[in-house]
Image (tube, helix red, strand yellow):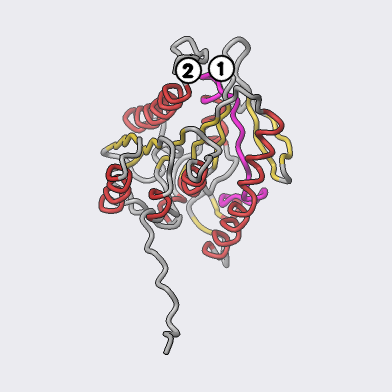
Amino acid sequence: MTSSKQPKEPEWLAKPSGACCLKGHIHSGDPRGEYEWIADMETYIVHPPEGKANGHIVLYYPDVFGFFTNGLLIMDEIADAGYTVLGIDYFQGDPIYLHRTALKTPVEGFDFEAWLAKYHKVAVDHVPGWIDAVKQKYGKAETKYACVGYCFGAPYVCNSLAGASPPCEVGAFAHPAFLKDHHFDEIQRPLFLSCAETDHTFPTEARNKGVGILREAKKPYHLQLFSGVEHGFALRCNLDVPYERWVKETSLKGIVDYFDFHLGVSEDGKANANL
């Protein structure tokens, strides 16, 4: 006699985006990139300054705020380091802030769980084809690829580092969400984890388990851990608080340095063929 019970769904290591993912501050600035459609997905693209291009590409997987000023400025900063950066809008012009009042209160009747489920499916269905289209349009034989994701974007970083022939050579995430054991089990390329000591979505026990999976399998990784900040620190910090600003800037610098090393980019920003 066979059991009618369904297999138990694996527990989350980094939980789905929640209330802690909706807090924070909006930064000021003038993003310098442009928008275009790639594989039916709106894409933000920003090129490095003239004379600084290293020939490589960074793919950006946004948090639930999507294409908001903070994220666009992060992409601009990565481009300033020499990379062509492309971000995907898997929220299809419907980021979470459109459903909130002054970023603090949800619009009456808004179903956050249904919104997450809808766009999780969009991302799962469209990210792989978008990557292929980006490579076809902007890649060259010598181009190498990195990826970075924040919160909601973390699983797509892990997916981009998995498989027999991962689409990216190196990846990074900050304050992740939506991760399970298999995301760490299947990684085949170096991963940079930028984390907060206090994070309801990715708490200490879960973080230690994820790192343990990587360590036991002898997979290359680097853990960057900050005290005194919480989930969202790398994107939505209060820039008027010196420590929070330093943490945000140090997180991004660590990510870019990790990409530079693993993609063989030298101190002058040029690709190093010896690495």
Left or right for 92, reference 183 = right
Residue tagged 1:
54
Q: Is residue 144 magenta?
A: no
Compare residues 110 and 232 and report the one nearer the observer. 232
Q: Which mark is residue 143?
A: none
Local secondary structure at mark 2: loop
**Which region shows up in magenta?**
78-97
Task: Please provide percent x and percent y for residue 262.
Answer: 43, 25
Above or below, 221 against 105 in this view is above
| First reached walking from the N terminus: tag 2 or tag 1 | 1
Q: Which residue is mark 2?
A: 265
Residue 150, horizontal then vertical, whole percent? 47, 42
Kind of residue sitting beneath label 2: Val
Identify the element where label 1 is drawn: loop
Image-based side of 150 in relation to 135, left or right: left
Q: Residues within 10 Å of mark 2 (few under 14, many from 20)?
A: many
- What amino acid is labelled 1 in the image? Asn
Label 2–label 1 contact, CB within 8 A: yes
Report the front residue among 113 and 38: 38
Left or right: 194, with 96 as reference point: left
Q: Quadrant of the C terminus?
A: top left
Estimate how packed mark 1 is, as few (under 14), some (14 to 19) or many (20 or more) residues with alpha carbons within 10 Å: many
Q: Position of residue 177 (x, y in %)?
A: 43, 51
Give the residue displayed 44% in from the left and 50% down from the top: 21
Work out whether 100 lies above or below 169: below
